[in-house]
Amino acid sequence: MDLMKAFTWKIILPACVKPKTNRLKPSSMSKVHVSKQNSLQRLALSDVSNPGSPISLHDLSSSLVGLNLHIFTLKELEVITHNFSRSDVVGEGGFGKVYKGFIKENLRPGLKSQPVAVKVLDLNGSQGHREWLAEVIFLGQLKHPHLVNLIGYCYEDEHRLLVYEYMTLGNLDNKLFKNYASILPWLTRIKIAIGAARCLAFLHEEEKPVIYRDFKASNILLDSDYNAKLSDFGLATDGPQGDDSHITTCVMGTEGYAAPEYVNTGHLTKMCDVYSFGVVLLELLTGRRSVDKNRSKREQDLVEWARPMLRDFNKLDQIIDSRLEGQYSTEGAKKLAALAHQCLSHNPKSRPTMSSVVKTLEPLLELNDIPMGPFVYTVGNDDVKRVCGEKNRILGSDENENNRGNKGEEKEEKGRRRRRKGRRQRRRIRVFRSRAVYSDTDLYKALGTSLYSPRY
Ligand SMILES: Nc1ncnc2c1ncn2[C@@H]1O[C@H](COP(=O)(O)OP(=O)(O)OP(=O)(O)O)[C@@H](O)[C@H]1O
Ligand SMILES: [Mg+2]
């Protein structure tokens, strides 16, 4: 598998000062206890990470009590990952390597057997304790169907590890840009955009809002049904509260996704996430990376190249992913382009909120003006067998025909014709085993893939 080496940059601006978040006074901070039910009492990152905080790393576990987070030993994680075997590496970013592992039955009470992803801090890398802590604090406390589930963590000496639910289909970046065998159909792209948008809306609307700060395709993970879940909370931070319009921070993020006003001033708002969301929408629409140094100078920066064409519907087909071969909703593409344009506005105040983004995106799943045509899609053997089974049932198998019995010449002849048709059909289905051909919508009908996920 191709490893993704994300390029994360960090610019320390002269204006780089401590976040202006409203912090609890030390006396009340020591009483902070987390309750899943009451988001008002959610532990903020600043409650733990600031110097002088009364909550030290060692009482982190007691502060997070009730969250069902498991604290693993390094030894346990060695067993889970087969000694951090190189062949089990499923990803790599600025934090370190991510391994696929498996938790066996009876490892510890309350922990079911399941596949997991284990992220290990690279002790020689550019990230460290702050990023690890941010993941524990945010992912440990926030629960949402479109947030990856943090199962537990480990800290022993200088070692810092995180254990997540395993996301079968990996990250969106790989699926969109590196999977040459099959391309993501239009409706799947919309489904992914909706899932990720719901997650950002949830974070922004928390009692203590959270700014994600590193929204990009490689941080959107996919389960086996293409449900999107946000992961990698290393750069997430508590948003402004009360009358504050923004927080001022060191500029951190990923080239090509960060909002221009944040890069220029260090002022971070929820609207910076909305901008990054607009960049990912553009990636889904065009099938191009936010920054692609292999293209001509004019086309290297996706936003710069595509933005002028987003409002001109006559030019839209010049930027839409040609690999879709025209199989997308024209109405949907126009709406998606207009939404991306709004999210990418230079003026943060002109950008939509994430909940309004969700409202704009959801109806795009219902648009059925997608041209039907052959669409090459790779499906697993089991799925093909299920489809074949369906078709055989509809056509009637030899066995069914035999059971019916013969009543007169006419009926027998009809039966023979049906049997011949059935055999022809089965031959055709056999051809499909190596290369299943479906249109986007046919695929979902045939395989019963849940495209319409619960309204979260
Ligand atoms: N739960 C998971 N299930 C499956 N794969 C995962 C999981 N978590 C991470 N990965 C894989 O590992 C990659 C890197 O993970 P992640 O983004 O969390 O690391 P990072 O070092 O924090 O990245 P960055 O460089 O963006 O800061 C992901 O893009 C994904 O391919
Ligand atoms: Mg990442």
Image: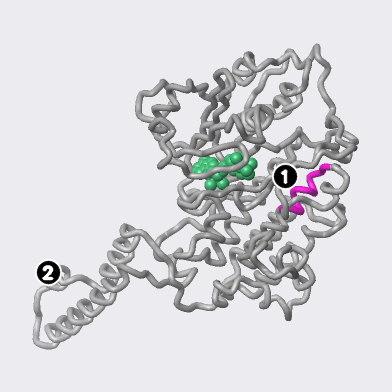
Residue at the spot x=48%, y=56% of the render?
450
Check disc 2: other Cα within 10 Å, few if <14, some if 14-19, many if 20+: few
- Front label number (2 vs 1): 1
Position in image of residue 349 (x %, y %): 87, 53
Asked if one can make out residue 411 in the rendered structure from this viewpoint, the answer is: yes
Q: Is residue 211 left or right of residue 135?
A: right
Position in image of residue 180 (x %, y %): 48, 64
In magenta stretch: residue 454 = no
In magenta stretch: residue 270 = yes
Query: In the image, is residue 14 above or below residue 259?
Result: above
Residue at the spot x=40%, y=61% of the render?
447
- Asked which secondary structure carries label 1, the reply is strand
Position in image of residue 156 (x %, y %): 55, 19
Asked if one can make out residue 145 in the rendered structure from this viewpoint, the answer is: no
Say which residue label 2 marks.
403
Type of amino acid under label 2: Asn
Q: Is residue 68 left or right of residue 110?
A: right
Q: Is residue 45 left or right of residue 399?
A: right
Image quadrant, ligand 1: top right
Say which residue label 1 marks.
9
Which range is magenta?
Answer: 268-276
Give the image quarter of residue 323: bottom right
Mark 2 / mark 1, whichever is N-terminal: 1
Type of amino acid under label 1: Trp
